[in-house]
């Protein structure tokens, strides 16, 4: 039943992405100054939103673990962190490709780009830390504390374009930037399939964490015999 | 549609989906490995209990 639900969500996400892509590529006009490349924003921005949502969930699950000491929260935290990291890499690389055309460079050490790179490195560090600690309860405790501290970087990334003068464009929503309503709507419309994909990948990853605990339990049983 | 920077748009979209597909492939591989490990451990425990 659960598998069928996951497949259905995948199919729905694929259908929505194809429908959105047809509008993005065939209906929406080129941006006056950027030309065709601006369309990358429909994946670049929702990928960042999905990643931040994942990191927020990870921080909340980490707090819940420290309060309740229930390993399910730790499993949830690692699942959404790993998927969030993948989405943050998508955000960074699509941003670099956009920057190569618009700025003429692949990378610049401005506040938004640097803080986002630090964010991705922090969460990659979180996943590495988990591999270094064997004992499940100790691993969960260390990881939860790390995840909560790592989350401090997320608002820094979010507000960096308002706090510092950056080469990165100003926020298109409630900021110095502006966007055509059709493009604005498409940004949210394309977030829906990416969120669905995020949920499916997180659910699969969470199931793997449960399988890992089952393996740990079977190993303990084998040692006891 | 302007073709001036269309090539880089294609690169961007391709790379975005490629990253996601690679991750899905890694997840699928890990899933198979975990299932195999569970089966092996269960078989091993059953053999121990029988003997």
Image: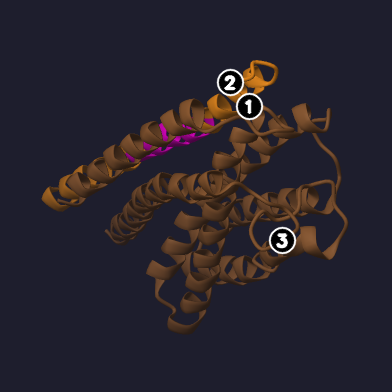
Chain colours: A brown, B orange
- Per the image, the residue denoted by label 1 is A36
Q: Is residue B24 magenta?
A: yes
* Mark 3, other Cα within 10 Å: few <14 / some 14–19 / many ≥20: few
Residue B51 percent across, percent down from the top left: 14, 48
Say which residue appears at 55% left-offset and 41% top-offset.
A42
Say which residue appears at 45% left-offset and 55% top-offset.
A79
Tell me: A4 left or right of A100. Answer: left
**Residue A134 visible from this viewpoint:** no
Tell me: B39 left or right of A48. Answer: left
- Per the image, the residue denoted by label 2 is B1
Q: Chain of mark 1?
A: A
> Is the residue at mark 3 from the same chain as the one at mark 1?
yes
The residue segment tinted magenta is B19-31
Residue A84 percent across, percent down from the top left: 53, 51
- Per the image, the residue denoted by label 3 is A175
**Residue A101 visible from this viewpoint:** yes
Residue A65 percent across, percent down from the top left: 47, 75
Q: Viewer-proximal residue, A188 or A211?
A: A188
Question: From mark 3 to mark 1, how far is it between C-alphas?
Answer: 23 Å
Question: From mark 2 to mark 3, how far is it between C-alphas?
Answer: 28 Å
Local SS, label 3? loop
> Is the residue at mark 2 from the same chain as the one at mark 1?
no
């Amino acid at each position: 039943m659960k598998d069928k639900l996951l497949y259905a969500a995948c199919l729905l996400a694929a259908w929505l992405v194809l429908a959105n892509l047809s509008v993005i590529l065939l209906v929406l006009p080129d941006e006056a100054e950027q030309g065709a490349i601006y369309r990358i924003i429909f994946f670049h921005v929702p990928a960042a939103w999905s990643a931040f949502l994942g990191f927020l969930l990870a921080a909340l699950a980490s707090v819940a673990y420290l309060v309740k000491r229930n390993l399910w929260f730790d499993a949830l935290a690692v699942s959404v962190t790993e998927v969030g990291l993948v989405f943050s890499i998508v955000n960074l690389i699509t941003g670099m490709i956009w920057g190569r055309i618009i700025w003429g460079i692949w990378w610049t050490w401005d506040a938004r780009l640097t803080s986002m790179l630090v964010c991705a490195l922090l969460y990659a560090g979180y996943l590495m830390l988990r591999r270094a600690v064997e004992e499940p309860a100790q691993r969960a405790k260390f990881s939860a504390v790390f995840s909560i501290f790592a989350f401090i970087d997320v608002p820094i990334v979010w507000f960096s374009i308002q706090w510092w003068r950056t080469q990165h464009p100003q926020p298109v929503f409630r900021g110095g930037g502006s966007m055509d309503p059709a493009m604005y709507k498409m940004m949210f419309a394309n977030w829906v399939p990416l969120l669905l994909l995020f949920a499916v990948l997180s659910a699969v990853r969470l199931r793997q964490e449960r399988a890992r605990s089952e393996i740990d339990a079977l190993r303990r049983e084998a040692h006891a015999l | 549609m302007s073709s001036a920077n269309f090539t880089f748009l294609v690169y961007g979209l391709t790379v975005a989906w490629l990253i996601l597909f690679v991750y899905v492939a890694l997840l699928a591989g890990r899933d198979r490995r975990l299932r195999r490990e569970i089966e092996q451990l269960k078989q091993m425990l059953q053999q121990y209990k029988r003997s």
